[in-house]
Image (cartoon, coloured by chain):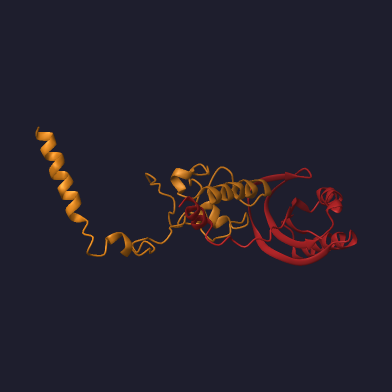
Amino acid sequence: MPRYELSLILKAMQRPETAATLRRTVETLMERGAVVRDLENLGERLLPYKMTKHNEKHIRGTYFLVDFYAAPKILEGLLDHLHRDVDVVRPAVLKKDEQAPKANCCGNRNEKND
Amino acid sequence: MLCVRRLRSLKTALYVSVNPGSRSLTSEIIQMENPYKEPQKGCTLCNVTVDFKNIQLLSQFVSPHTGRIYGRHITGLCGIKQKEVSKAIKKAHSLGFMSVTHKHPQFMKDPNICGIKHLD
């Protein structure tokens, strides 16, 4: 199964509510047959710009990163579900690239020219 | 007349240098790698993964006043890395990690990689 990354920005809430939202999200993922690999908390910070979502202007938010393995067909449904969640400000699913930096990325090209 | 003399002198000069008795230089040339070759210089982001989450790194390639992405002639990055950085910055903008119109004040004191001097 391909590996995805869910970048989640949650509304600035108290700790128990944030925990409940996260729990809900991960449970949704698991219900749809995804295997959650890693959950990272990037902290609560001031958002780079005011975001309007669910008729509310958000200035602060908590950033989370969820690594998971899933089938590609669940992604549409998952994103739809996340957009409808009131506590989520900005969800985004991205593919995870498993590439280490190519050795001598600049050096290779120079050698080819020679 | 003069040209003919010069040609003759040229001819004799050429023939004198090649002495059939001694070993000629052409057979003694040893093939070797250029000993004065300098190590390959990569761009500043050679072997550094560029990620949209790493906004501190990305902010170094962005103007502090307007938040605009610097061009290749200013950053000095190679083609591949410049494209990667540009794409990562745009991704960070859309996902809500980095501001579009300015540079985060926390990163204003970072060392200047790009060859640009601000009149501050």
In the figure, B71 relative to B45: above or below?
Answer: above
Q: Report if residue B104 is visible in the image.
A: no
Image coordinates for residue A23, horizontal then vertical, percent: 83, 64
Q: Tell me: B57 left or right of A43.
A: left
Residue lying at 66% horizontally and 62% vertically, measured from the top left = A42
Residue depicted at 37% across the width and 44% down the height: B119
State the residue lying farthest toward the top. B1
Question: Furthest residue to the front?
Answer: B20
Quadrant of the rendered image containing residue A10: bottom right
Which chain did the image draw in orange? B
Asked if one can make out residue A114 in the rendered structure from this viewpoint, the answer is yes
Q: Who is closer to the viewer here, A11 or B20? A: B20
Residue B75 image position (x, y, % from top left): 46, 48
In the drawing, does residue A10 fall left or right of residue B106? right
Q: Is residue B95 left or right of residue A87?
A: left
Residue lying farthest right? A31
* Chain that is coloured red in the picture: A
Q: In the rendered view, tell whether residue A45 sits above or below residue B10.
A: below
Q: Which residue lies at the image location 43% right of the left edge and 54% below the top edge?
A: B112
Along the line of sight, which residue is nearer the eye, B105 or A106? A106
Query: Percent from the top left, x then y, of residue A100?
Result: 62, 63
